[in-house]
Image (spheres, rainbow, N blue to C red):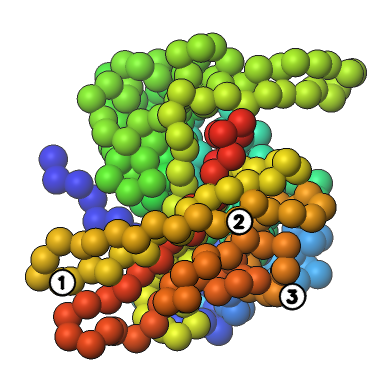
Amino acid sequence: MSERHLPDRTLLPATGASVYLLGIAGAGMSGLAMLLAAEGYLVTGADRELTPETDRLRDLGVRLWPETATQPAVEAELVVYTSAVAPGHPVLAAARTAGVSSLKRARAMGALLNARRLVAVGGTHGKTTVTAMTARIAEAGGLDPIALVGGRVAAWNGNARAGAGVVAVAEADEYDRSFLELDPSLAVVTSVEPEHMECYDGPSDLVAAFREFAGRASERDGILACAEGPGIPETLRGLGGVHTYGLGPAADYRVEVVARDGARQTCRFTGQRTPERRWPQVSDSGWGSRSLRILWWDSRGSTGECRCWDRDVAGPSSTTMHTIPPRSGPRSPPRATRGRDDRSPWCSNRTCTAVPGTWRLTSPPPWPGRTRRRCFLSIRHASSPYPA
């Protein structure tokens, strides 16, 4: 069977249009409502029962209606509904009769997020916790992500975060095959066990769905899977770009708990391979997407190298490498946002585009002839393989 066309922004109306959410109080729908409101849509909706999340939505200007009121849905330009809504629901039926477009929540979520650098966290267990932790780390790292989690995150006072960065972090739910509406750049899989089997034709069908979900990321940022997760080896066997994390020595990225104090733990991270993660940086000059590759560093300072490629479009590229001096000053995480910081390392090559004092790499206009120059700053510290 041919793969279904993945949703994109063409399925959504123009910013400022009215979007009606049927089942707006649910964990997934309330977060989606918040993100749509942050995008500039006029969001309305209804549900059988209201929750603390709907109170927060009211504060954002979202108008809530009785579930039996059909007129608000008829007047909207798009109706989004959950998998729990019956096909013959009066509100949904009235909207379709009036010619209003409708989307399931998962498809609307994909339309909103798929154009971004999407980190999608799937798995039959543990995905909510991992999604929340990943989004918070991305937030602390200055990536300003858009995030959608299936549970409440205390720091956000809700389950979603609106961000202006190019990175999105989202929980990918296997229920109703919802995660197959996502197009992840990095797919995280925590475990694959029989769950929501009413949506699948047996265990092999569930495994096939997870393979399709994860396989979309193989040729991009890859697949990150729990080494000890049930069903992981069988599900991901043969797929490219797979890295593993876990507690055992077989994991590519290993977590070792060295101390415990009540609910707090001190951990050491070790790895079998030099990790690199490429995060996109879009230059102000408009010459397209650039990357900043950063690895975790600590207070002892770091050394690294700047690799400048002089690339002829018709021929091979040549590489110039030069050392970046050790970082000094108090400890602070590397920054992926613009701004001066004289503690940052820089490239000492005068022709390099890595500018002292900024973590954003720009690109110059095309060089004469058919040559272009691109530079990627790579900071390494041997003791910490944890990707920034």
Would you say residue 378 is visible in this rendering?
A: yes
Q: Where is 255 relative to 215, above or below?
A: above
Q: Is residue 262 left or right of residue 72?
A: right
Ranked by sequence position, the earlier of labels 2 and 1 is: 1
**Residue 101 can be seen in this image:** no
Give the residue drawn at x 17%, y 71%. 312
Q: Where is mark 2, residue-wise? A: 325
User: In 3D space, how far apart are the residues under numbered discs 2 and 1 (Cα atoms)?
Assistant: 32 Å
Residue visible at 27% across and 21% down in the picture: 237
In the shown orientation, is residue 362 left or right of residue 318?
Answer: right
Q: Secondary structure at mark 2?
A: loop
Residue holding disc 1: 313
Other-residue count near label 3 (Cα within 10 Å), few / some / many at <14 / 14–19 / ≥20: few
Amino acid type at image mark 1: Val
Pick the front one: 160 or 292 = 292
Report x, y in % for residue 43: 62, 72
Left or right of residue 123, residue 299 in this image: right
- Residue 28: percent from left, percent from top: 59, 49
Question: Could you tell me which residue is drawn at 73 percent across and 62 percent down?
Answer: 343
**SS of the residue under disc 1:** loop
Asked whether 358 or 245 is in front, the reply is 358
Mark 3 or mark 2, earlier in chain: 3
Residue drawn 35% across and 31% down? 242
Q: Secondary structure at mark 3?
A: loop
Q: Amino acid at mark 3?
A: Gly
Residue 129 x, y percent position in the rendering: 65, 34
Which residue is label 3 attached to?
Answer: 61
- Amino acid marked by disc 2: Pro
Q: Within 10 Å of the Cα at label 2, are there few (<14), some (14-19), or many (20+) other Cα atoms?
A: some
Q: Earlier in the sequence, mark 3 or mark 1?
A: 3
Task: Between residue 250 and residue 174, name the one nearer to us.
Answer: 250
Disc 3 to disc 1, how far (Cα)? 51 Å
